[in-house]
């Protein structure tokens, strides 16, 4: 009879899903200390939050999966909880790391990330902007930067500088028109490199533009640095809700405090002053309620916001008095206020 091996145990556990995140325990990095003694297998499952209501189900599923292996007579599972910030890079000189996420693409997540970064910088803060959107790294275009400056060997990777903001993008690492398929481990090391090897210097804020949805980038980030908070961008209509709610659940599950929800493209202001809610209404408020966090802003549909994005001139810098810029500026200020109120700052 073949003896059981660590690989086979991990293989079996990679078939067990976290019921909320819909991802397996191994790729979530939850399985630790696998030990095999004769026909007894023991291991630890490290949950991301101590108060995980699904811990019994996860434990039972994991036990069953390993018991089903040939050569296993008994299984001992220890359930633990990771201390937030454990094993993560702590010596970055960055005070606040804020991730901007969304349920799906096209809701204005990058627009919000870019304008928030520029607005904070215009207030005198030192700000970095990391574009981790592997599916559509649009930050270079929106910030009007094409490439990274040269990097002297001893100084690490130099970020680009635009509107006072230090900019790094996953888009700088691929040639245009050559989409790269990022696999888990490669992505993880790219994210690590972005955070450790880029010469960010001292920052008050690092804003991270996440890919839409709930995937590997989010996990890698959370495993690499202590995130100070997350902002979720959504649109008013109901069809966005389920996707956005998943993004909220993922932040919660990964112990990232949700600073609040941004509803984008909430309304169009007509010349007579009336508001047209083209995309319906209520989505942002409903999501904020679900997240237990405030609705931080309702950003209007504004041609200037779109033009600013296309031309690489963020609207908060190019037309600060426009309604769109004012709303985005107010959003940045309330995020900054929340950071200094509720978290370390
Ligand atoms: P995501 O990052 O969610 O995919 P983007 O930020 O790239 O979305 O925005 C998608 C498109 O919508 C861009 O062309 C952007 O300029 C435009 N856009 C975003 N927000 C607004 C807004 N409030 N008003 C007008 N256009 C907007």
Image (cartoon, rainbow, N blue to C red):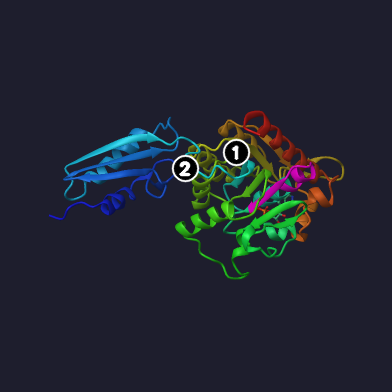
- Neighbor class of circle 2 (other Cα within 10 Å; few <14, some 14-19, many 20+) is few
Task: Tell me how many marks there are.
Answer: 2
Residue under the image location 22 percent in, 46 percent down: 36
Tell me if residue 338 can be seen: yes
Taking 177 as reference, is 184 left or right? left
Q: What percent of the width, then of the height, locates residue 189?
A: 50, 56
Q: Which residue is mark 1?
A: 229
Q: Is mark 2 within 8 Å of ligand 1?
A: no
Secondary element at image label 1: strand
Q: Which residue is mark 2?
A: 87
Q: Quadrant of residue 310?
A: bottom right
Seen in the picture, residue 190 relative to 205 is either above or below; the reply is: below
Q: Quadrant of residue 151?
A: bottom right
Q: Nearer the viewer, residue 291 or 98?
A: 98
- Neighbor class of circle 1 (other Cα within 10 Å; few <14, some 14-19, many 20+) is many
Where are the magenta residues, as a range?
117-130
In space, the residues marked 1 and 2 are separated at their CA atoms by: 18 Å
Secondary element at image label 2: loop
Residue under the image location 60 percent in, 59 percent down: 170
Q: Nearer the viewer, mark 1 or mark 2?
A: 2
Taking 312 as reference, is 95 left or right? left
Tell me if residue 137 can be seen: no
Q: Quadrant of the C terminus?
A: top right
């Amino acid at each position: 009879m073949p003896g059981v091996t660590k690989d086979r145990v991990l293989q079996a556990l990679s078939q067990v899903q976290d019921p909320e995140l819909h991802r397996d325990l191994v790729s979530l990095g939850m399985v630790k200390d696998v030990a095999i003694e004769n026909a007894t297998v023991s291991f630890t499952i490290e949950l991301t939050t101590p108060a995980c209501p699904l811990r019994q189900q996860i434990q039972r599923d994991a036990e069953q999966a390993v018991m089903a292996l040939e050569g296993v007579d008994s299984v001992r599972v220890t359930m633990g909880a990771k201390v937030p910030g454990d094993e993560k890079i702590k010596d970055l000189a960055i005070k606040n790391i804020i991730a901007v996420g969304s349920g799906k693409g096209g809701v204005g997540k990058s627009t919000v990330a870019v304008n928030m970064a520029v607005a904070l910088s215009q207030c005198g803060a030192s700000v970095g902007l990391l574009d981790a959107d592997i599916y559509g790294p649009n930050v270079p275009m929106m910030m009007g930067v094409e490439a990274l400056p040269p990097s002297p060997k001893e100084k690490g990777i130099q970020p680009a500088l635009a509107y006072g903001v230090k900019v790094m993008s996953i888009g700088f690492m691929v040639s245009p028109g050559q989409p790269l398929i990022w696999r888990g481990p490669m992505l993880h090391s790219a994210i690590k490199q972005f955070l450790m090897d880029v010469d960010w210097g001292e920052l008050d804020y690092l804003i991270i533009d996440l890919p839409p949805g709930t995937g590997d980038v989010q996990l890698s980030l959370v495993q690499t640095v202590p995130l100070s908070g997350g902002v979720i961008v959504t649109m008013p209509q109901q069809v966005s809700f389920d996707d956005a709610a998943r993004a909220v659940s993922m932040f919660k599950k990964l112990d990232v405090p949700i600073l609040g929800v941004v509803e984008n493209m909430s309304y169009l202001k007509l010349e007579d002053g009336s508001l047209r809610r083209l995309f319906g209404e209520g989505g942002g408020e409903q999501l904020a309620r679900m997240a237990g966090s405030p609705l931080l802003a309702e950003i209007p549909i504004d041609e200037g916001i779109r033009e600013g994005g296309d031309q690489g001139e963020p609207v908060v810098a190019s037309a600060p008095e426009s309604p769109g810029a004012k709303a985005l500026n107010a959003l940045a200020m309330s995020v900054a206020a929340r950071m200094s109120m509720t978290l370390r700052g």
